[in-house]
Amino acid sequence: MGFFIEVVIAGLMNGVLYALVALGFVLIFKASGVFNFAQGAMVLFAALAMARFAEWLPEWLGFESLLLANILAFAIAAFLMFLFAWAVERLVLRHLVNQEGVVLLMATLGITFFIDGFGQTIFGSDIYAINLGLPTEPTFILEGMFPGGLLINTDDLITALMAMAMVALLTLFFQKTGTGRALRAVADDHQAAQSVGIPLGRMWIIVWFMAGLTALVAGMIWGEKMGVQFALTFVALKALPVIILGGLTSVPGAIVAGLIIGVSEQLAEVYIGPLVGGGIQIWFAYVLAMVVLLFRPQGLFGEKIIDRV
Amino acid sequence: MSKKKIGEVILDVHNISLRFGGVKALSDISFDVREHEIRAIIGPNGAGKSSMLNCINGVYKPQEGSITFRGQTFKHMNSRQVAELGVARTFQNLALFKGMSVIDNLMTGRNLRIKSNLLLQALRWGPAEREESEHREKVERIIDFLEIQAYRKTAVGQLPYGLQKRVDLGRALAMEPQVLLLDEPMAGMNVEEKQDMCRFVLDVNDEFGTTIVLIEHDMSVVMDISDRVVVLDYGKKIGDGSPGEVRANPDVISAYLGTSH
């Protein structure tokens, strides 16, 4: 029983990260109807900026503190993501208002290639470490309940908490603020939103910036675990089954589906894996997504698509 | 109706022409709207009524002409500016925020008036909390006015058509507009719903003194509630005056009924 719970917890921690990346997709899709292919590239770009500035700043400014370096680097990376959001609205989205979804999709593909290349040109294309200075030694909890207790990695736990805080902040922002309400309005109907004086351009900048921030937090956490490298863009691919499962338009859907996929792939790997020779974790999520597509094309929480004939 | 006080010209549309490529949607249209009046724009299908409204609203940019609003003259408007000036609109084919509740839909109408900053709003802190509840009060008053109290928490997409039209009107009212543009508010309604809507339009005009520009298809409705009527046909103005005058105008009769040659 103890082992089972350990597996579930490990899965949940991965799941929180999947949810975070998936949220980036959902935010942009909701507000502008664009499926943003660049989300993965944004994760890489943000993580690269964070890793490199955390390395450069102490050299340039001559201080030692790891915490200070990380905080400053995070702030700079966040600012870069803001500039990025601004540039995307100014240079791309503004010129494509009222275009077909496919056109916008292609535009985000273009953005993907651009920031992949651009990021690696400025920041370099090696593998870089992000060191958040988290304690790495595993701890045992609930030793009274299970023989030997449950083994948990402290840094996993802390990063999962960070991701959860980010998700909570986003939910608060969307549900409780006037700007959040305006964003939901833009998501539902552009023309009507304009008629009540909601500025589309500014809303798009805000939502791309939000997606940029989730990319930064996700990139920071994955970077801390496995180093900042090109493979980070593939983490975003894991978000695809999450979105399919949760529904492309649902924020809670992204969160729940992220957790479901995290846990189920971990369980499948441990319990079914040995029967078929392992390696299940790589494809399990996609198969799960395919099954969901067969029975509920709109995802578990998505809006049902009803067209009037 | 006669006791109503009609004021100065608030909106003056001057020689507006609008083309889409080679298609002339509007040619050389001029008319004015006086404060507190109900001004109707009527015409057969494709006459350019909605195009006219969209020019005033800043959705379309006319190639020629100008629009004067409260003494300020514009070549063309943009949506944000129009909203800030105090012009609200409703839509012919409902454009509501379907996933959001009735209250939230109306609250978006307050968007331009929310002053406190984002962080305070998120935390529901002091002044932001007070501001939110002030806006909420205004919205509740409109909900009472439109008699949709029972549906305030319902997602708009689940309401029947007639009620959705009311929510559309409510969202526009939440902006506390000086001028309200209504794009076929009675389209697709049954007789009862039409009567309700007429009553609301008249009440808005009466109680809040809102100037109303109304596009309508249904002649009988228009003649009953409006003070003055503009008639468009094929993008040209063919009549302008009181309902009685317009009804007697031979051009209008032929546009609506056809003539024998």
Image: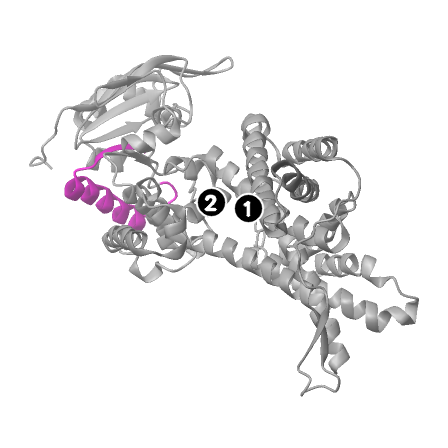
User: Sequence order check: which comes first, mark 1 or mark 2?
Assistant: 1
- The crowd level at tag 2 (other Cα within 10 Å; few <14, some 14-19, many 20+) is many
> Which residue does the image show at 45% across and 36% down from the upper left?
A191
**Badge 2 amino acid:** Leu
B183 in magenta: no
Q: Quadrant of the C terminus of chain A?
A: top right
> Which residue does the image show at 77% across and 78% down from the upper left?
A3
**For residue B253, above or below residue A156:** above
Q: Residue A183 shows which numbered tag?
A: 2
Residue placed most toward the observer, A236 or A165: A165
Tell me the subunit letter for badge 1.
Answer: A
Mark 1: secondary structure: helix
Which portion, as a residue range, is magenta?
A: B187-215
Mark 2: secondary structure: helix
**Cβ–Cβ under 8 Å for marks 1 and 2:** yes
**Badge 1 amino acid:** Lys
> Which residue does the image show at 71% across and 60% down from the upper left?
A292
Q: Is residue A304 left or right of residue A39?
A: left
- The crowd level at tag 1 (other Cα within 10 Å; few <14, some 14-19, many 20+) is many
Q: Is residue A28 left or right of residue B88?
A: right
Q: Which corner quadrant of the image does residue A72 belong to?
A: top right
Numbered label tally: 2
Q: Which corner quadrant of the image does residue A106 belong to?
A: top right
Tell me the subunit letter for badge 2.
Answer: A
- Residue B218 shows up from this direction: no
Residue carrying label 1? A30
- Residue B103 shows up from this direction: yes
Q: Is residue A12 left or right of residue A280?
A: left
Q: Which corner quadrant of the image does residue B53 belong to?
A: top left
Q: Position of residue A91 (x, y in %)?
A: 58, 26
Residue placed most toward the observer, A42 or B133: A42
